[in-house]
Each structure stands twice: as structure tokens, then as C-alpha cells.
Image (spheres, grey):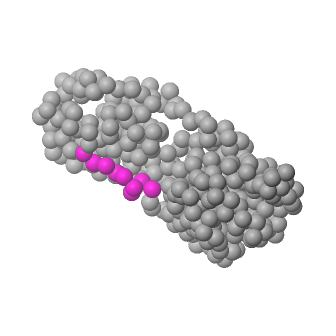
Amino acid sequence: MNHSTEVRTIMMDKEISTIAVMTSGGDSPGMNAALRAVVRGANRYNLTIWGIYRGYQGLIEDKFVELDSEKVSNIVQRGGTILKSARSQDFRTEGGRAQAALNLKNKGIDAMVVIGGDGTFTGANLLSKEYGIRVIGIPATIDNDIIGTDETIGYDTALNTAIEAIDKIRDTADAHERMFLVEVMGRDAGFIALETGIAVGAELSLLPEELTSISDIKTQLKNMLKEQKRSSLIVVAEGDETGGALKLAEKIKDEFTKYDLRVCILGHVQRGGSPSARDRVLASRLGASAIKVLMEGHNEVMVGVVNNSLKITPLRVAVAKKKGLDFGLIELAKMLR
């Protein structure tokens, strides 16, 4: 038996008395609410709980702080994450993960709750398989691209932030008869772009999941011009194959000189701000559920909510597949143009 296998067996066999929690990857509104629920859920089982600063990098660098109910009071309404977040190249190496596991062992930590997206879950799954750390994942990303849950923590807030901004852009676009290309976040997933487009009445929503040629885009815009629309609003997902709003504007501007063509990239404003009520409730529910399923003996799983019921999904499944868009919403967006 090699050293990592021996450590794995010992840690898996231990009764859980001490756990750690961290936030990792891109931040999303509601992470603090999830953290609060994890800590207060752990208190019900009389568990010792450690917070890890700056995600996996902090885990490697031994950046721990002991948490209790008082330390997570008055954070449910705050955006960002009090534990901070970071991406870690060191954790991608065997040496980095070995150091992370050693730091957990030295603190007597039996299990981890990780709050983040698919990259966070990939790291947690590796740590569990290589070193026997029991892990539970909580899906938190504005992209909403993780299967096993109807919505991820932060998605609703990001969606409402985008809608609020675009409603204001629509006002000025109409006043000046402008064509606005508005880029929203989401990486290679079009959830924000699709639902934002419907909510703001966009003439066109460009999604990574739907291949749309430049010639098709031009044709659709020309058809809109025939309808004598005073202004036009196009929502572009940052991962769309057109290359984003700026590149798309360069490709179409010469054929649409009637409009004052403008580009607005909403960017990281979508990650900030106080989480919505929906995100606070979801985060609280998932944080408490993570502790519950951990104490029931589950490992290497993610907690989510599907059709208003708790759902448990293996981490390997959560990172292997991407959630698809609702075809009915895609058709609705096209019909409403």
C-alpha cells in the first residue's frame, strides 16, 4: 500500500468531527449566504469548522481560520466572499495536492465542503480520490452551466443585474435611434444571454449553443430595419462564436450606417452586488443540505435543487456534462423578436 492510499483509507474510516469549507473559482453573489448556512449547519452537529482563505491556493499555503456562528453573522446580504477566492496553478500538480492534503491532515480535518463551479468540483474530486478527503460540492457560478440543479448560486442575481443595466441602455438607444450590442457573461454557456434577451425584449440574442453566421445576423437585422424600428438591441453571450460584441460590431458596421452602432460590455458588474432573495434562499438551502448529506455518509457528490426538491449528483457527473439550454425558451426568444 502506497502512502496516499494509506492516508485515504485512514481518513475515509474516521468519524467526522472537523470539517473545512472554502469558496473557489469565480465569485458569485450568494457565496456568503451558503458559507453562513454551512457553518450554522455544522454547529448543529457540534462539528469544528475551518474556513480556507483563497480557495485551493490558500489550502496549499495553510491559510486557515476557525469559523463559528458569530464570524458568519451579517454576511447573508453581502456579495463576493469573505473567504476570498483564487485560481491555483499549484493545485494542478501532484506536489500541490499532496501539500494540500497534508495541511488538512495536520488540522485534523475529515471532510470538506467546496463552494464553486466545475473547476472547483474537479479539484475536490481529485483530492478525495487521491487522499481520501470526503467532499461535498455546492454549485455557485453565475454561468448556471452545472447539471444537477435548476439554478446555481449567483445566477438569479447576475440575470437581474444584466436586465437592470440593459433596461437603461434601451432607454438611451431609443432616444438616439441607436443599435446597441450588449455583451453579457456566461463563458461558453448562453443562459444569461437567453433569459436576459427575453426579459428585455431584445431583437436578437446570440448564444454559444446556437451557431449563427455573420450573414444570417445581417439578414435578420435588415429585416428589422424594414419594420422601421427606431432602435435595436442585440444581446451577445461572451462565448458566442462571433467573437463577442466588439468583434461583431466590426463585422457588421459598414452595412448598418443608418444606426449609430454602439457596444456595451457589462463585464464583472454581473458578479457583484447584494444577492437577490432567490439566491439567498437557494444558497442557504444548499449550504444546510451539504452538511446534512455529509453526515448521512455521502461523499464526492454535489447538492442541488431540481423541481424544488433536493438532488444529489456525483461530482464526476457534474464536471463531465454541461447543462443544456431550454429549447422552449430558445423558440420563445425567436418568436418574440
> Which residue occupies 50% across, 49% down?
142
Residue extending farthest bottom: 70
> Which residue occupies 83% across, 55% down?
6
Q: Is residue 62 left or right of residue 235?
A: right
Judge by depth and name the residue closer to the eye, 53 or 181: 53
Q: Is residue 287 left or right of residue 293?
A: left
Residue 38 in sight here: no
Residue 27 versus residue 320 in the image, above or below? below
Q: Is residue 265 magenta?
A: yes
Q: Is residue 156 left or right of residue 199?
A: right
> Which residue occupies 79% across, 49% down?
298
Judge by depth and name the residue closer to the eye, 23 or 149: 23
Q: Is residue 67 magenta?
A: no
Total number of numbered labels?
Answer: 0
- Res 97 → quadrant: bottom right
Judge by depth and name the residue closer to the eye, 311 or 177: 311
In the image, which residues are magenta? 263-271
Placement of the C terminus among the 4 image quadrants: top left
> Which residue occupies 82% across, 66% down?
17
- Res 23 → quadrant: bottom right
Q: Is residue 270 left or right of residue 113?
A: left
Residue extending farthest left: 258
Residue 180 in sight here: yes
The picture places residue 275, in percent across and down from the top left corner, at: 51, 59
The picture places residue 251, in percent across and down from the top left corner, at: 22, 33
The picture places residue 46, in percent across and down from the top left corner, at: 81, 69
